[in-house]
Every structure is written in C-alpha cells, then in structure tokens.
Amino acid sequence: MSDLIERARELDERDPLAAVRASFVLDTATDPATGTAGVYLDGNSLGALPANVPGAVEDVVRRQWGELRIRSWTESGWWTAPERIGDLIAPLVGAAAGQIVVGDSTSVNVFKALVGAVRLAGGPEAGRDEILVDASTFPTDGYIATSAARMTGCTIRPVAPGEVPAALGPRTAAVLLNHVDYRTGRLHDLPALTAAVRAAGAVSVWDLCHSAGALPVGLDAHGVDLAVGCTYKFLNGGPGSPAYLYVRAGLQDRFDSPLPGWNSHAEPFGMRPAYAPADGAVRGRVGTPDILSMLALEAALAVWSRPDVTVDAVRAKSLALTDFFLECVAAYVPAGRVEPVTPQAHGERGSQVALACDDAGEIMERLIAAGVVGDYRAPDVLRFGFTPLYLSFTEVERAARVLADTLG
C-alpha cells in the first residue's frame, strides 16, 4: 500500500495538468471521521463547477439581462452564441469552425440528426429503409431512433458496434453509434466504422457524450457525417447545459432538419409564412437559445484556452489515471470480488472504469457515504469517471483503498 501511495505522489508531482485543478470548485474539506477529503469520480455524469462560471453567470443575469435587457441580443452577442460556442467545441472533437451549433438537449439533437440522416440517404423512396442502432446504446437514443424510424417509414435494427460492417447493406439509411459505451466505458472504433458506413452509402451519426473533452475524436479527419453530444460531462457545462449538433460542411446544404424553427430560417426576423433554411450549421437551430445555461457553458469552456490544456494531454492523463486505478484495485481488492468490464487496451477504453459485482447498488451507496462519489448502473456495475482536468493520482489511490475497505 505504501508503495502505491508514494507512486501517486510522484505521479502528481510530474503531472503537466496538475495546475488546472485550481480552475475548478472541488470538495477539499477533510472528513473528521476518516481524516481524508472526498473523491469525485462522477464527471462522466456531471462535471465539476469551473471556478469562473459563477462570476460569468452573475454578469449575464445582473448586467446583460438586468441592465441591457433586450439590447443584449446584439450588444452581448446572445444571438450568435449557438455558433460561437459551437466553434469553441469544434477543436475538442476534431472539427473545423462552422460545423457545430449549440442548443437543445442531446435527445432532441439525436432526433434532428437521425431523421436528417435518413433524408440525406434518400429514405424509403430510394430503397434506404433501415436504421442500424447500437444495441447497447443509452436507452434514450434507442427511444428516439424508434420514433425517428416510425416517422420516416424505416425499420430499426439493433446491432453490436463490432457487427455493423457485416450488417450494412443497400437498405441501410443511417447508423447511430456511441463513441464510448455509457455503461462499460468501451471505446468503439470510430474511424473504421465510419468508413464502413460511408462505403455502404449510408449516413453516420455518432453520439459523443462520453468522449468529447476526454479523448480525441477526429470528426473531420474520419469523415463523420453527423454527430451529437452533451456538454455537462467532460465539458463541465453544468446540469442540463445545452447539447450540440455537428453537420459536416459538405452536407450542410442538403441537411433537412425535421424541426425547422424561426431561429434556423434564412430570414428569422422576416416572419415569413413559408420556411426557408439558413445556410450552414445554423439550420440546426430551432427556437430561442437558452441563454443562461449557454453562456455558463461558454465560461466553462474557457479552461480549454490554456496552453497546457490540449485534448492529447487530457487523453494521456486519462489513460494514466485509469491504468493506475485498475492497478490499485488489483492490489487492494480481494481477488474475485469485482470484475473489470472496461477494456484493458488503451485503444478500447474511454475515460471511465466499470467494475461488476453482485451488490453494486449497495456498495455504491456505501462508497458515496464514505466520500468516494461514483455511480451505479443496473444490474451490477460500479461506474467511475475520470476527469483529467481536476482529478489527481492521490485521489485515485485513495478511492481504490476506500473501495477495498467497503467491499471488505
């Protein structure tokens, strides 16, 4: 145990991202009962609060809304916020500017993207009447896909991501996949799967909720057609912060959103009875932007402007943190008590570690009571998210030690 504690200290001393931790509001108070501070390992559900966000939100409320009022749509840049903030997210997912619009929820954007994908592929009229969906997808994506299929005259076919190339055919219109499995943390092969979808003449739609801000994505480099993602996990935008929609530049003039709103109209203030879509990613907008949460997100993304914060640096630390956690778990937890379900290989691992055990729900409750905050996924998974921007190796070692004590 002492060797791992010392290793953790040495890793923290050499951590090039260690100084970024001060940019977040974290629980560093020591529990008098245990003599230790809490460890937050649930950034894959809700990221920690960036320290600059409260002041930014106060300015939005008191000055921009309270004093400037309606003038803020132009003077404070409210109207252009969806595209401006989209351009801040773009480099984090490997996209050039002008392809991401921020707004609505992930679920709404999945609907827009999937129906839009079927239309881009030609739909049933062109013989493309099947949508392939990740069989292990987050439930809401499945619900939305089923509804989108019903509305477009398509059928749904759930398949494991690894089986997608064999399942593709002339009937495939669109393929909806998760970059990282929400439950196991498995990272799927976005470049190879996207290439297979493209070769089959179908349209790819990727859910980036568990990868954006944690690892390289490469949307442009790999020719992804459409993508969606949330901003409250590794992007630390806050509870319910708006999601985003990526539409590849080469498809924007043909992207036909199933939710045309006045914000995506070519002349939004023309109040015309007939809809005419705007150019570019703007046609992914629908209604009035949710300014309070959107500008909180913009403030949260400021941390990525630091020269020491790059996606590659974050990925390197993510892998080091998860490697070290798995090593500590193997050293501290009795053999056979838990089983890692997250792949060991770096190329197949996101930024979380999932451990299976029969009493996972009860164990997680006890862990949280002991100050180690992760989450539980039915029926048997303990899920721990690792956010490199604010997590230390010392905390990782401590979390594994508390886990062992709890299991014991």
Image (spheres, rainbow, N blue to C red):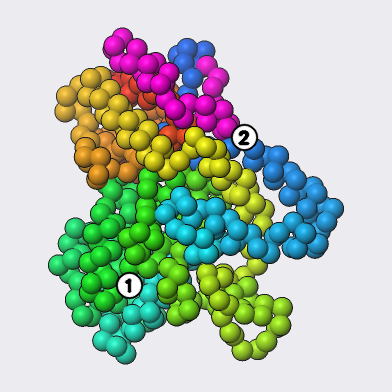
Magenta residues? 1-30
Under mark 2, the amino acid is Ala
Mark with earlier residue (1, 2):
2
Q: Is residue 131 visible?
A: no
Q: Residue 321 occupies which quadrant of the picture?
A: top left
SS state under label 1: strand
For residue 8, say whether it is visible: yes
At label 1, the amino acid type is Val
* Residue at screen point 28% across, 22% down: 328
Residue at coordinates 62% horizontally, 54% vertically from top-left?
294
- The residue lying toward the viewer, choosing from 358 and 22, is 22
Which percent across, then down, holds residue 3?
A: 29, 11
Q: Is residue 134 above or below residue 147?
A: above
Q: On the image, numbered disc 2 is attached to which residue?
A: 51
Query: In the displayed structure, does residue 266 sit left or right of residue 41?
Result: right
Residue 338: quadrant of the picture: top left
> Most prominent secondary structure in the magenta stretch?
helix
Residue under circle 1? 203
Q: Quadrant of residue 118?
A: bottom left
Residues 15 and 204: in front is 15
Residue at 25 percent of width and 44 percent of height? 347
Q: CA distance from mark 1 to mark 2?
A: 40 Å
Which quadrant of the figure contains the N terminus? top left
